[in-house]
Image (cartoon, coloured by chain):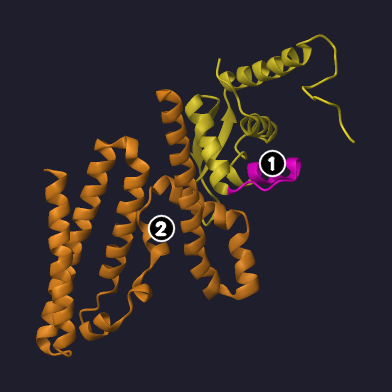
Chain colours: A orange, B yellow
């Protein structure tokens, strides 16, 4: 499957999704709006799949520009994933009115999507090092739980970017 | 011969000093920070540990995490024979480097120190 096809399909689905969401907003919570939101859910899932396919395809094919592609693709994936998570089929009008930045749930995505090895190490480290206990003591359990995901996301990203940077340096050194 | 970086060397020495089955990320991080008085981020620490495992200087295995980690398994590290040899070679290299140019104390300083 060509990358152009994957990209084109994603663009078409993104446009289609915008149309469906606009329709949702205009229908003012009537029954049809519910069906439209359900359809939007399905479209979002399709876009996510295409985004993942594109990321994997490009990463395997062009490992030289891996870093840039990974950054762009994950950025898009984050965006689409968070939109999909927030589609509420029982209240589609609310969804259409929610500003984009309020729908983003970056840390959830990072914790859910990134490699399990890194995740396990980051999670364990967070608890064992006493950071979690410190947060509970200072700000309460609710805030500590919220911070836990953000912190883990940061640790995992920290791992990944350092690993990627090491890989890039190795590649440059190998090529020269 | 593979070159061992300074952080890598320190981490291997620290791992060698920590009792077996206890050399996981957090104790290694604490020992490193105590020794150097510098903070090492989990990202830098684990990336270096992974690299040392890839080079064959360390061996890693998973053990039960215990209550402190909410039963999330942890990875413990051990210096391999290859790693111990690399440490010895690094030490030898350092000694040899100090002997270059005889016993003169000048370490590349030009023009002296101070005004």
The structure residue drawn at horizontal position 17% and vertical position 58%, both measured from the top left corner, is A10
Question: From the viewer's perspective, is B58 left or right of A161?
Answer: right
The numbered dot on residue A139 is none
- Crowd around label 1: few <14 · some 14–19 · many ≥20 (10 Å): many
The structure residue drawn at horizontal position 65% and vertical position 71%, both measured from the top left corner, is A137
In the rendered image, the quadrant that contains the N terminus of chain A is top left
Q: Which element type, helix, strand or loop, lies under badge 2? A: helix
Read off the magenta span: B27-41
Residue A24 vs residue B112, the one in the foreground:
B112
Mark 1 and mark 2 residues within 8 Å of each other at the beta carbon: no
Identify whether A65 is placed above or below A101. Answer: above
Q: Which residue is mark 2?
A: A111
Total numbered labels: 2
Residue A69 visible at all:
yes
Identify whether A115 is placed above or below A17. Answer: above
Q: CA distance from mark 1 to mark 2?
A: 27 Å
Principal secondary structure, stretch drawn in magenta:
helix
Dot 2: chain letter: A
Question: From the viewer's perspective, is B36 left or right of A132?
Answer: right
Q: Which element type, helix, strand or loop, lies under badge 1? A: helix
Instruction: Tell me residue B73's x, y (percent).
Output: 49, 47
Question: Same subunit under labels 1 and 2?
Answer: no
Instruction: Tell me residue A28's x, y (percent).
Output: 17, 90
Residue A4 vs residue A36, the one in the foreground:
A4
The structure residue drawn at horizontal position 52% and vertical position 67%, both measured from the top left corner, is A147
Question: From the viewer's perspective, is A29 left or right of A138?
Answer: left
């Amino acid at each position: 499957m060509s990358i152009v096809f994957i990209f084109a399909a994603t663009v078409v689905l993104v446009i289609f999704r915008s149309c469906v969401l606009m329709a949702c907003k205009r229908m003012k919570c009537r029954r049809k709006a519910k069906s439209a939101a359900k359809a939007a859910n399905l479209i979002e899932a399709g876009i996510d799949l295409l985004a993942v396919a594109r990321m994997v395809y490009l990463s395997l094919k062009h490992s030289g520009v891996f870093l840039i592609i990974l950054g762009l693709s994950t950025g898009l994936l984050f965006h689409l994933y968070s939109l999909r998570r927030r589609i509420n089929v029982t209240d589609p009008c609310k969804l259409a009115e929610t500003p984009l930045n309020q729908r983003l749930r970056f840390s959830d995505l990072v914790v859910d999507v990134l490699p399990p090895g890194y995740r396990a190490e980051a999670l364990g480290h967070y608890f064992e090092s006493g950071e979690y206990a410190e947060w509970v003591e200072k700000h309460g359990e609710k805030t500590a739980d919220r911070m836990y995901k953000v912190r883990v996301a940061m640790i995992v990203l920290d791992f990944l970017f350092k690993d990627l940077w090491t890989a890039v340096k190795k590649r440059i050194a190998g090529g020269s | 011969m593979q070159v061992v970086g300074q952080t890598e060397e320190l981490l291997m020495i620290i791992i060698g000093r920590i009792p077996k089955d206890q050399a996981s990320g957090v104790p290694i991080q604490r020992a490193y920070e105590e020794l150097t008085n510098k903070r090492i981020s989990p990202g830098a620490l684990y990336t270096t540990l992974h690299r040392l495992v890839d080079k064959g200087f360390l061996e890693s295995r998973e053990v039960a995490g215990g209550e402190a980690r909410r039963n999330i398994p942890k990875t413990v590290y051990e210096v391999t024979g290859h790693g111990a040899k690399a440490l010895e070679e690094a030490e030898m290299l350092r000694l040899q480097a100090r002997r270059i140019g005889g016993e003169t104390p000048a370490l590349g300083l030009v023009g002296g120190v101070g005004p």
